Amino acid sequence: MNLPMQAEKLLPHRGQMLLIDSVIKVEEESGTALANLSRQTISLDTDGNLLAPFYIELVAQAYAAVCGYRLQSLGQPVPKGYLVGVQRFQINPEASVKHDRNELLISVQTVGDFDGFAVVEGKVSCEDKILAEGKIKLFVPQDETMAELLAQSVPKGNAASWQI
C-alpha cells in the first residue's frame, strides 16, 4: 500500500459526508490527511466557510482513515468506530479562509487509548494557518460482541453521541 491513498478506500463515508480526500502520512501514533471541500458539500455555509461542527468531523475522519490505512497495511480488517466526545475544541475566528478554494491539512495524533477508547488530538490548518484544534474521543469496539451490544443500545438513526 502506498501513500497518498484515497480516503474512500479507507472510510465508509460517501457523497457529501466524505470530507477528506486522501491520507498523505501515517506514522505509529499519528498521521495527516488532506481535504479539498467542494461547493457541493454540506459542510460549507453560503459564503464558502466551513461550518463549526465539520472541523470536528474532519479530525474524526482523518483519524479513522489513518487507522484504517495502518490496519489494512497489516492485513487486518478495519472496524467501525464512533465519535463519543469532544474536548477543548477551538476554532480560530481570525483564520478565515474560503475553504472551497483551498486545501485543508488535518493532522491527528493518538494521545491515549484504553480498551477500545481513544483520545485524539487534531489540528486543521490551511496555508500554514491553524484554523481549529482540539481533542476528540472515539470508541472502536474490540470484538463482535461489543459491536452488537453497542448497535442494540444506540437508537436507530443516531449512531453518535456528542459531548461538548
Image (cartoon, rainbow, N blue to C red):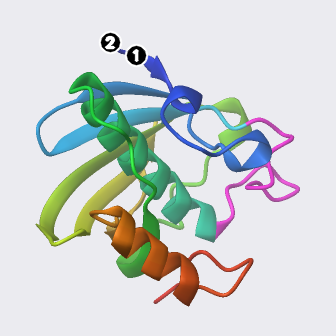
Residue 109 in the image: state x and y as whole percent.
21, 52
- Left-right relation of 117 to 128: left
Q: Is residue 151 magenta?
A: no
Give the extent of the magenta segment.
Answer: 38-52
Residue at x 84%, y 39% (from the top left corner)? 39
Q: Does the magenta stretch mainly form a helix, a strand or a loop?
A: loop
- Left-right relation of 136 to 8: left
Identity, as a three-letter code, of the amino acid under mark 1 = Pro
Residue 145 falls in which quadrant of the image? bottom left
Q: Which residue is mark 2?
A: 1
Mark 2: few/some/many CA within 10 Å (<14, 14-19, 20+)? few
Residue 89 falls in which quadrant of the image? bottom left
Q: Nearer the viewer, residue 134 or 111?
A: 111
Residue 45 in the image: state x and y as whole percent.
81, 59
Q: CA distance from mark 1 to mark 2?
A: 9 Å
Q: Nearer the viewer, residue 44 or 23?
A: 23
Q: Nearer the viewer, residue 45 or 82?
A: 82
Pointers 1 and 2 in contact (CB under 8 A)? no
Q: Which residue is mark 1?
A: 4
Residue at x 69%, y 38% (from the top left corner)? 37
Residue 94 in the image: state x and y as whole percent.
51, 62
The answer to whether residue 104 shows anywhere in this view is yes
Residue 160 in the image: state x and y as whole percent.
56, 77
In the displayed structure, 79 sits above or below 85; it is above
